Image: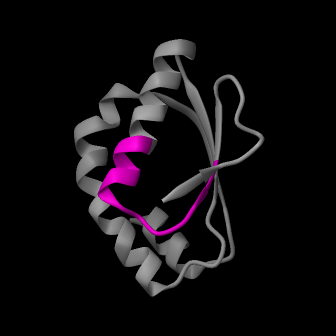
Amino acid sequence: MFDLLDATHGSVVAVQMGHGTSAGYREFYDLLVEKTDEYGKVHVYEETTGWTLATYLSHLHGIIPDLRTGQKFDIGRYAAVGDSRWAQLLYHQ
């Protein structure tokens, strides 16, 4: 679902997001919880290039794990970078 980028270090998690999957969301949220436990806050940089309608739809099922796990991690700063209107739509929801 995501690839860790070289910029991941300390409290910064840098990823390139692809198609969303249940297992991928569990892995991503586990990483955010781990970094929050270690550093108090986690800062996320997310690349969302080349998303299509299918990519957007694949991330809709990530909303439920977010509701369940979201209170376990603390995001200080969040940057989403990309050129896709589908990713933009997901973030505005």
Q: How is the image coloured?
A: one colour
User: Measured along the vertical axis of the image, is residue 35 above or below residue 57?
Assistant: above
Residue 66 appears left or right of 89:
left
Residue 53 occupies quadrant:
bottom left
Residue in the picture at 64% in, 78% down = 50
Among the 4 quarters of the image, the one containing residue 73: top left
Please provide the residue range marked out in magenta. Answer: 15-27
Most foreground residue, 25 or 46:
25
Residue 10 drawn in magenta: no
Find the residue positioned furthest to the right: 6
**Would residue 3 appear left or right of 19 to someone viewing this image?**
right
- For image coordinates 32% across by 67% down, the residue present is 60
Task: Judge whether residue 25 is colored magenta.
Answer: yes
Q: Position of residue 25 (x, y in %)?
A: 37, 50
For the image, the number of numbered tags is 0
Name the spot of residue 5 as percent of width and height, x first. Answer: 71, 47
**Quadrant in which the C terminus appears:** bottom left
Residue 87 at x, y = what percent?
Answer: 53, 71
Residue placed at 41% from the left, 64% from the top? 20
Location of residue 89 with respect to 40 vertically, above or below: below
Q: Nearer the viewer, residue 76 or 23?
A: 23
Residue at 46% x, 23% y is 34
For residue 65, side relative to residue 5 (left or right): left
Q: Quadrant of residue 70?
A: top left
Q: Nearer the viewer, residue 33 or 79?
A: 33
Indicate the position of residue 12 as horizontal and vertical percent values.
67, 32
Give the vertical position of 59 relative to 85 (above or below).
above
